[in-house]
Each structure stands twice: as structure tokens, then as C-alpha cells.
Image (tube, rainbow, N blue to C red):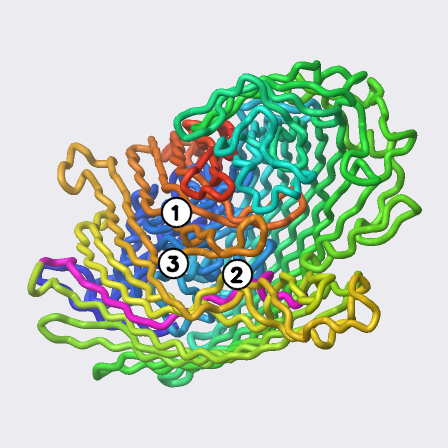
Amino acid sequence: MSKPSKRHPQAGDTRSPTFKMRPIAVACSSLMFIAGAAYAAEPVVTGDAAMETVVVTGLRHSIETSIAAKKESDSIVEVITAEDIGKLPDVSIAENLARLPGLTAQRVDGRSQSISIRGMGPKYGVTLLNNREIVSTGDDRSVEYDQFPSELINSATVYKTPDASLSAMGLAGTVNMKTIRPLDVKGRRGNVSFRGEYADNGKLNSGTDDIGGRFSASYIDQFADNTIGIALGFAHLDNPGQEKYYKSWGWQDNSLYPNQGWCGGGSCVSPGLVAGQTAITGFERGVTSTDRQRDGLMGVLEWKPSDNFSSMVDLYYSKFDQKSIQSEEQAFLGGMWSNASYTNPVANAQGVITSATVSVPANTATLLSRYNKRKDETFAIGWNNELKYDKWKFGVDLSYSKAKRDEYNGQQVATLAAPLSYLVNASTTGISSFTPSANLADPNLMQLFAKWNAGSARAATPHIVDDMKAFRLTAERAFEDGVITNVSGGVSYTERSKDVKRAEEYYDLVGGPRVTLAPNVLTSGQPGVLAWDYQKALSAYYGPGYDAYSPHGTTYNGQPWLKVGRFWGVEEKVTTAFGKASFDVDMKIPVRGNVGVQYIHTNSHSTGNVWANNQVIPATGDHSYNDVLPSLNVVFDLGNVLSKGAMVRFGAAKEMARPPMESMRAGIDGSVGNLPPFLWTGKGGNPDLEPWRADAYDLSFEKYFGKRSYLAAAYFFKDLKNPIYNQKGPIDVSSLPAPANIPVGATPFPIGTVTAPANGTNSGFVRGYELSGSLDAGLFMPSLDGFGFTGSLSGTDSSIQERGANIYGDSFTTTSPLEGLSGIVRSMTAYYEHNGFSARISQRYRSSFTAIARDQFGDPSLTKIGSEKIVDLQLGYAFETGQLKGLSVLFQVNNLTDEAYKTSVSAVDNPSLVLPERYNKYGRQFLLGATYKFQ
């Protein structure tokens, strides 16, 4: 770390020129366990002032600590400290980050999981743990923040402008999460906490729970004359999830299909409709019950035998087990090959069918029983050593992190053997209704059936492993006089590998093509439809599972081509050298900041498969590239010319975001036309991808007053270059074997066409503003002591459009906004804290955005997610005196207004007609608990 630069106190300012905030003993747990009050750090006072220990408790001190860190930074940053974390009903660190200015969270299954910074999706950011890049249990580089209990994280800093001394940086920003250093704490600290939890959607599937709980404990102490420190933390989560969901299968005008011959040689328009009318093509609706069990462990061992040497080992481990069951109804109501017919259709002014009776053939009414399991493990360990010699400081850091994810996502199918009709009332703004003409809860009608292939049950079994080894050497020198206050430099080396295997299993139905479910297998789930136990049915009615990609018996030939895009690996070796100089100029307008540069060399190796001549052929690809990333951060202190506490910050830098690893995979799924010149076409990944790159500029005006109040207005502009999007391009296929579908002796054309991610030559921008502030009401009116408000408003826009193929895969007319970009983001929190009582209500809002979503079997697609407004509430009381001192009680409500998760979709070949797709309700979570802290 660089030496703090000189600061310039203003007239009447009694603060010392330099100070250092130290985390409190229970900072990593007391408030993160929703303990009520928190212990304050002991400030270090320099100069002529005597050292004084001041104990301050509560949320207001946590806000004060965060604001002080923001003010003292040379970069434009947002900070949360341990005292903040846990003051709202937060399952993970994601909810805490989502309340910071310019940051948003994406909900997955009702919980915040990924973070977008300044309107750019998760893939454009980087996450560090204790200053080291960390791997992910997700499908790509992006960290899934729900793997990190808020109880175990001491602080988090979001860098919106780069700092060359960081081990890794993102284009959108960098999140650096930190655990506590036990030698920064005075004395022993500890606590235990328990909260009960209730999900108000109730038990939507039989045999599930709507009641859970959370337990956490922490212990921090020092030994051997305060030269050895230890910190331990444990957090257990038992979180029930109960979800009601609906999804339309899209909307389309069948007359727009380019080849009407696809529909048996005639028109693709469903009988009863006319060309130009748009109809819903199908639906699924159901209920999901999920049991989430997460155990997190944090440990830190610190040794500082002298002022000149320190060594610290920190460890983090998280195990997250999730199990869910689903009861679902679905039906295919229109489009190619549906054989549906319409009577009494009613269309609105846009030609959308809003009501009709739709007749469908046998085996269209479908029920599914789903059983999903997921187990995630995240492990990170680091060993950091620092040696001071004269004015020099040398550092050596070794680290290793590994993430592993295993899933089982199974489904079984039951259908109605007879034709039926649905009375459809299609909503263009919300949930459509579908009333079947048959009783879908009758087990004699709804029977297990081999609907889509030889097996009527299937399961996806993804397996993902991501690991990283890193080594870093640093040197730093401080200067007491002159403009330059500190110089630092170093080199780091990382090796990262990610392997993805998305296997599938099929199960043959034993005992005939249709099987009636026995009473002992039946359960209850979604009202009005049959529900059954997946595991019991699997053992009673199905044979052993077999590989979906390989032949099996005489009735199933396998689907090996599906393996091409689902089995891949990427290895990266990255060498980074950096240099940085901090400066502090004392003049009428004091100026401080830093200037630095990173040189990065990257080597990548990709593996995958090619589908050619009806066989899977292993494929590899190698690539290397270099980046030079200069950065500048400048802070102008306007206290002498404008107002005490006023400052302007400016940042300029070159930034980059590495390509998504899935896009870097080797391998192509291709085929050859059976007519001359036998052209080869395919789709796949691209091992030659290089990063998104940008020139970034930031400007921020900030005014600080009091200890817990500030106002800030910021503007940022990123000139994006080298964008990554799906493109068509040539590929050399001369080495691939000739397929069997062309005449013997014929040779395919040596240059084929592939649709794959590629770097474009065009450029664009992301720009926006951020308004933020924190107001301590007692500063302006003493009678309002204890009341306060924090809030932010951000506006972002971009000229960049994500581009990709349409549903036919052969044109690039479809575009969508930059992934993760919400035009408007705001966050507001009002709080009261006085004499042990505390109350806090918070609201965070983001406008609609696009994001990557995956279906039941892991295939990705861009989804437009609707705007959402999440409200959380907390009420508490902490006993500050008497025999109960140290005890606090807390009541919380998460998602107070039961905000729905909504997505929308454009009608096929009519992007301007946007209609509802998903509508999910997760319910509220109520929590009641207590914490006891000790020392």
C-alpha cells in the first residue's frame, strides 16, 4: 500500500493532517450479524494532540467511517464498512453493494447475485478478495456474490477509476472485498447471532419448508504481547424460497416465416388466424420450492513481531447447497408444427390476439415435475508478507483460489393422451390466463409419457471448475519532502483455468409409452394440476440413466452434436508489471493524486470440439496479446477558495474487460450443404478474442460537512473500442473430413462461414451522471439528532448495441442495449438511531435492462428484465446498560412490497412490439432474531 499523502487542514479545522481508521473488533460480524450497535475503531491522532480512545456505537458511526474513506481516497470510490453490512436483511454482500451509487444487482431466484457497475453488466467488472482476483462458481468470470455471506466481509471498496497498484482491474469498475486484520483491533471481541426466517408465500409444494434461520459467530483476539492476532468467523444460512412463476413462450406472426414450406408445404399461419395477426405461442406456469443451505468460514492469522515485518495468512471457504422442486403446467399453442387451431379470436389494434379458444392435439397439455440440486464450493487462501527497510517496503504475496459447481437439473413429463382446448385470455401487460377443457389433476388422464425422445425423463448435470494461482512482488518507497510522496512498483503472475462440462442424462420409461402414476407417488403443488415426487417416480418407473450424447440400445442414437458447445475449457497465463507515483502539491489549491501504468501480457489456450462428418473432433486454439493501461487520479482541494470540505476529482485511464470465457472456447458445430459448391457453415466460439478496451474520463465534485454528511455530483464517459459481438466470418475448413452427405469423391469448399463472437472495428460510448449524498439531520437541527438520510440517483446511456443472429441464425438485424445497462438507478435510505432504538427503511430501483439468462439446461440467451423497486425494513433495539448490555434484538422484512421479477420479449420479426414473458413472485421474507456481543 502507498503511504498516505499529506492533507491540508483548513482554517478552524481542528482535525489532524493525517489519520487512519482502524476496523473494530466485531466489525466483521457484529453489524453484519445485525447486532444493532457496533464497536468503533480507535482513531490514531498525530501531531501535538494526545491519543484518545473514543467508543462510538451504531449505524451513524459506520456511515462516518465509509464517508471518511471515500473522502481520503485519491480515486473515485464508494465504500461500505463492516458497520454498514448487516444493518438491512442482507443474505449476502450483493445487497450491500447494490445500495451504493451507480451499482445495481440482478436477482436470480429472488436473491441478488450479480453486480453491474455504472450501467455495464457483470462481465465488464472485476472482483477482488483481499486485493487478489478471485474465481467464480458462475458460468463465466463474473463473481456470484451470493457465495459471500455479509457476516464475513469486513469492508468493500468499489473503484470507479483505476488504481495501477490493484492486482486486477475491470472496465466498468473493480470491487475489492476485505476480511478483517485482527491486529488492527484492540482486545478480544466476539459475538453470536441467531435469526429465524419466514417466507410468506407459504409451502407451495408439499414436503417443503417456509421457515428457516441464520446463525453466525465470530471471535477476534491477540496474543504474545499483541504480535499475533487471530480472527475467526462462521455463518450458516438456512433460507427457504417459495416462488410462483409464469412464462410465455413468445409471440409471433406465423405468416412472416421465410419458408412457408417448413409447415408441410402449406401456410404456417394457424387455422382461424389471418396473416398479420400475432398470437402467444405457448406458456408455462408453476411453483418452485427451494431449500438453500450455506456455510461460510473465514479465518485470519496475523504475525507482526516488529514494526518492520508482518505476515498474514487469510482463508475463506463457502459451501452453498441448494435443492428445489417444481410443479409445472405448459402447452404449445401456436406456431410452426403446433397443429393448433383458433376459434373466436379477438385482436387488439396492434393485431395481437387477446382472447380465443385454441384447440390442440393429443399430448399437448403437459405437466412437468422438476428436481434440481446445486452444490457450490468456493475456497481462497492467501499469504502476504511485508518487510520495511529504511524508507522502503517490500511485499510478497502468494494466493490460490478454487471454485467448483455441480448440478443436477432433472425433469419428468406427463401428458394428456386426448385433444383438448384452452380458453386463452392473453394479456399484453401482465399474466395471461389459460383454462383447459380437461381436468389436468386427474392421474388417470395425465400420465407419464415419452414426449420428446426415447426417454421421457432427462437431466442436465453441469460440472464447472475454476481455479487460479497467483504470485506478486512489490516494492514501495515513501518520501517525506517534495511533490512526490510515494512510488511503488511490482510484478504479478497468475494462472487461471476454467473447465465446463454440461452433460445430460436420459431415462427410458419402463412399462410402456404411457404409465399411470400410483397414489403413493403423488404430491401436491400448483393448484388444479397433477403433481408427483420426482425421485420416487424415477426409481419406480424409469430405467438407469444414460449419456444423452451417445447411442443407447436400439431406439436412441444419441445427440453428440449437443456436446460441441457444452464441453470446453480455457487457460490463461497473465503477467502484469506496474508502476505508480503518488503526489501532493501544497499551494493555494492543494493538489494530490497518483499516476501509474500497468503492462499486461496474456497467453490463452482454449479447448473444445468440432462437429463434422457426424462425429465430435477435439479442437484447440491459442492466442496472446498485450495491453498498456495508464491511469491518472487528481484531487483538487477547494477549501481555500470555495468552501471547507469542497473538492474536485478527475480521472483518466485506459481500461479493459477480458472476453467472456465461454466465448473464447474452441470448437464449431457445423454442416455442409449437399449441393455444389458444398459450402461449410457453422457456429461456435473464438479463441482469438481480445478484450473490450476503453478510454475513460471521470469528473466528480464533492462537498463534505460534518462527519456523516456529504453531497457529490459525478460525470463519467467511456469511449468503448474493440467490442465483442456475434459476427459471420470466413474459416479454413480444409483440414476437416468430408461429410457423408455429399457425393463420394466430392470436396467441400475449403473456406467456410462461421457465426461466432468476434471483435468489431466500430466504437461507441457509455456515459452517465451520478448524484449522491448523506445527510445527518442532527447537524442542521439538534432536535432531529439520530435521524438521517442517504441516497443516490444515476443516469446512464450508451451508443453500443449488443448484436446477434435472429431465430434463424442467418441475419444480424436484431440488436439490444448493452448488457446490464439500466438508464435510471436510484437508492434511498432513511434511518433513525438513538438511545438503543434503531429503524431503517431502504429502497433501491433500477429501470429495465438486458442480461444473460440460462434455461433449464444451461443454454444462454439475452433477456430483457423489467424495472424493479426493492424495499427493505429493519427495526431494532440494543441494550446499552444493565445486565443485558451487549444484547440486541432485531426485526427485519426483506422485499417488503413483494416486487415481482418481470421480463419481456419482442414478437418474432417485430422488435418494436414488446410483450410480457416472465412474471415471478418470490414473496416477502420476515426475520426476527437477537445478537449477543462480548469482549
Please name whichever residue, 291 or 835, is drawn nearer the observer in this view of the structure.
291
Q: Say whether marks 2 and 3 touch (CB < 8 Å).
A: no
Between disc 2 and disc 3, whose residue precedes?
2
Q: Position of residue 815 (x, y in %)?
A: 44, 52
Q: Which mark is residue 800?
A: 3
Q: Secondary structure at mark 3?
A: loop
Badge 2 amino acid: Asn
Residue count near mark 1 (Cα–Cα under 10 Å), binned few <14, some 14–19, many ≥20? many
Please name whichever residue, 738 or 823, is drawn nearer the observer in this view of the structure.
738
What residue sits right under mark 1 in the picture?
Answer: 83
- Assess whether residue 229 is covered by the magenta stretch: no
Please name whichever residue, 803 or 140, is drawn nearer the observer in this view of the structure.
803
Q: CA distance from mark 2 to mark 1?
A: 45 Å
Q: Position of residue 32 (x, y in %)?
A: 46, 44
Tell me where the magenta segment starts and ends, as one range. Answer: 643-667
Number of labelled discs?
3
Judge whether residue 633 can be spotted in this image: yes
What residue sits right under mark 2 in the picture?
Answer: 726
As displayed, is residue 828 above or below residue 345?
below
Q: Is residue 795 left or right of residue 358?
A: left
